[in-house]
Every structure is written in structure tokens, then in C-alpha cells.
Amino acid sequence: MPQQARAHEKNVAFRVMAAPVIAFTAAICRLDVQHGEKLPKTGSFVLTPNHFSDFDPVVIGWSVWRLGRAPRFLAKASLFRVPVLGWALRQVKQIPVERTTRTSGGEAMSAANDLAASGAGVIVYPEGTLTREPDLWPMRGKSGAVRIALENGVPLIPVAHWGDQHILPRWSKKISLFPRKTVHVLYGDEVDLDRFRGKPLTQSALLEATDQVMTAITTLLEQLRGESAPAERYNPADHNQTEFGRPL
């Protein structure tokens, strides 16, 4: 992406919002970004991170910003109902997702497709919520990310991060400010979805492609953690858990 186009992607509203967030995050966190060159410098992309802390979007957004792109997320619709914050999120084209209605989900997908078609990047957490896996490994994924990538013919890039659980633990509301933590972010190679492109997006094809994406994310996380993930991916339904809200 030419420098002028990249500057336009980071519009004034984006820069005004980003400045205090980056300053605060830099004060409490060292960001170690590995293989950032794998994030496309030009054109559209779908970025798929793992998700185990409410601080994750800050870390991933900051890493994308540092790599020269503007981070745009599919985000919880409830955030858009917060005064001022909701207005600000719309100014920088974040996408609200209402988890409980099929209609809103379709609207979110349409908005994400519009962004992808315009040359922007879209960040989608394929798990859809914080992982229920006891040791913070990625759990079963949903098909939204691969659907956006396949319907728009754009690359899907996996990314894993580790360390932000020490800043804000899963389901916690208390941020640990000191001592300053290090968070590692590892970008991976584009997931090869060629065998699915140009073909009907059947449920089985979407499930297979999504599993491929979750495997790529998990492999990256194994590298960061220096250990192996469980052989079987966690499925909340097998443990009588809902997929949203804090488990009882």
C-alpha cells in the first residue's frame, strides 16, 4: 500500500483514538512482535487471533498499528451502546456484532465484507468469545473468518499472542499495571484455503476450513508457549457450557 494510502487508512479519528490507548499500553506492556512481515502491507486481509483475555484486542490492535495497518474488529455490539465510545468506534469503522440475533450477525458479515472489498483489513476472533479451555488453548472455532476470506478472495493470516493474561486474566476486570509485562505476538503464514475457493461454501467445507485455521493458530501458540496443546480441541458443548458469558 503506498504511503499516502496507508496514511488515509489511519484517518484523523483513528489517530486521535489510538494515541492515548498506545501510550497507556506502552506504559504497562512491552510488545514483542515476531514475523510481522507476514501481515500484508497492501490490500485486504482477514486476521485471526486466539482469544483468552479482554485485553487481547488492545494487544492485537497495537501490533497491527505498529505494522502500518489500521486495526478493524468485529466487536461486541454492547460496546457501541456506551456513550462516546460507541460513537468513536463507528468513526473508525469497527463492526458491531450482536451475538444473540441471526439478523444482526448477517449485518456484521455484510459490513465485514464491505471492508474487505474496500482494501481494508478485518480482525476476527474465530472462537467468538474467550476460550473455555482450562489452560487457555484455543477452543473450537466458528466459520465467520473463513467465510469473509473466501467470499472476498482475500488472504487469511493467523496470529497468536501470549502474556496478556498477566495483565488482565480471563474473565477478570482488574488490570495489573506493575511490573511491566512482556506480551509476545507471532504472525503466521497465510492459511492455504485454495481448495475451498470458487466452490460452494457448504457447512462441511466451512467446518474443514475453520479447523485448518484453528490448527494454524494453535501451532503458533505452541511455539510461543514452548509446549504442546491438547490433542483434542476443546468444545464447550461437551462440557455442558454455554459459549458466552463467564461459565458458572
Image (tube, rainbow, N blue to C red):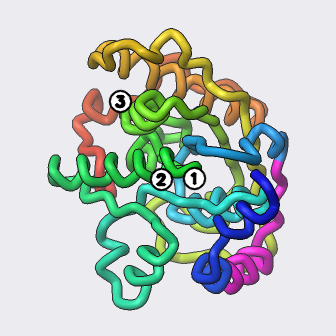
When asked about the image quadrant of residue 26, the answer is bottom right
Three-letter code, disc 1: Ala
State the image quarter where residue 180 is shown. Answer: bottom right
Mark 3, residue position: 235
Q: Nearer the viewer, mark 3 or mark 2?
A: 2
Mark 1 closeness class: few <14, some 14–19, many ≥20 residues within 10 Å: many
| Mark 3: amino acid | Asn
Residue 138 disc label? none
Measuring 45% from the left and 44% from the top, which residue is drawn there? 131
Residue, x 24% and y 44% (percent of image)?
242
Q: CA distance from mark 1 to mark 3?
A: 32 Å
Nearest the viewer among 136 and 152 is 152
Q: Secondary structure at mark 1?
A: loop
Quadrant where the C terminus is found in the figure: bottom left
Left or right of 170, for residue 219? right
Labelled pair 2, 1 in contact (Cβ < 8 Å) = yes
Task: Look at the image and give the residue range highlighted in magenta.
Answer: 18-33
Q: Position of residue 119 (x, y in %)?
A: 58, 49
The span from disc 3 to disc 2 (Cα, nearest Å) is 30 Å
How many C-alpha atoms fall within 10 Å of the one at disc 3: few (<14), some, or many (≥20)? some
Q: Residue furthest bottom?
A: 84
Dot 1 or dot 3, earlier in sequence = 1
Residue indicated by mark 1: 120
Tag shown at residue 115: 2
Nearer the observer, 81 or 1:
1
**Lower position in the chain sequence, tag 3 or tag 2:** 2
Magenta stretch encompasses residue 30: yes
Q: Is residue 213 above or below residue 160?
A: above
Q: Position of residue 159 (x, y in %)?
A: 66, 40
Q: Which of disc 1 and disc 2 is earlier in sequence?
A: 2
Amino acid type, mark 2? Leu
Residue at 68% across / 47% down in the picture? 161
